[in-house]
Image (tube, rainbow, N blue to C red):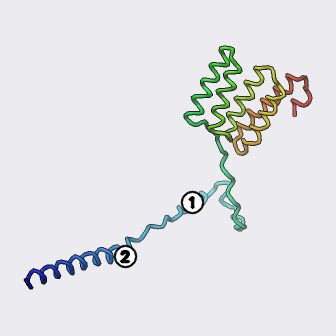
Amino acid sequence: MKRRTLRHALGTHAALLVALACVAGCETPGPPVPVPVPAPVPAPAPGSASAGRERPPAGPARPAAPAARRYALGTAAGALVTQARGQLARGEPAVAAATLERAMRIEPDNPLLWIELAKVRQAQGNAAQAEAMGRKALARASGDPAAEAAARRVIAESRRARGQREESRD
């Protein structure tokens, strides 16, 4: 009977030692991470226009200009916009507006949806509301030059439709 107890005790201790060895192995540091080295800047070729010029002293680093943002429609909102355009082409602007409002519940801050809804409001003959939608789109389109330009076009078209020619140029 003592043999079984001794075997059991050795088995338990062996399992504990294996577990500790695994944990200890996990704590060792991995291989060193390579650090990227910037490529050297080639010297100007002799005889080139910049060969005789010295480089200006390095000043404080300027923050990088933010990249232009591009808004896009998600899959569901894009499908609803396509559906709304078809409805508008069939002469159903009220149904198209309801479809776009569904898309806006999915992506409420997407300026492209506000622009689409402004176009529907223009088709309905409601230029004042189209301008308001264009202004909302412009407020949300910060950083996307294409969306900002489309929003400004909608605002200008709605002003022209109301006879405000001078304001539409601004």
The image quadrant of residue 169 is: top right
Residue for badge 1: 42
Instruction: Report x, y in % for residue 46.
Output: 61, 58
How many discs appear?
A: 2
Q: Residue furthest bottom?
A: 2
Of the pair 128 and 68, the residue shown nearer to us? 128
- Kindly report the distance in space between the C-alpha atoms of the residues bearing marks 2 and 1: 44 Å
Residue for badge 2: 27
Of the pair 139 and 95, the residue shown nearer to us? 95
Considering only vertical position in the picture, is 54 above or below 1? above
N-term-proximal mark, 2 vs 1: 2
**Mark 1 element type:** loop
The image quadrant of residue 69 is: top right
Of the pair 124 and 66, the residue shown nearer to us? 124
Kind of residue indicated by mark 1: Pro
Instruction: Report x, y in % for residue 35.
Output: 48, 67
Whether residue 114 sits left or right of residue 157 in the image: it is left
Query: Residue shown at 77%/33% (left/top)?
Result: 133
Q: Which mark is residue 59?
A: none
Question: Badge 2: few (under 14), some or many (20 or more) residues near its Cα, within 10 Å?
Answer: few
Instruction: Report x, y in % for residue 170.
Output: 87, 34
Kind of residue indicated by mark 2: Glu
Question: Badge 1: few (under 14), some or many (20 or more) residues near its Cα, within 10 Å?
Answer: few
Of the pair 41 and 18, the residue shown nearer to us? 18
Considering only vertical position in the picture, is 115 above or below 14? above
The image quadrant of residue 161 is: top right
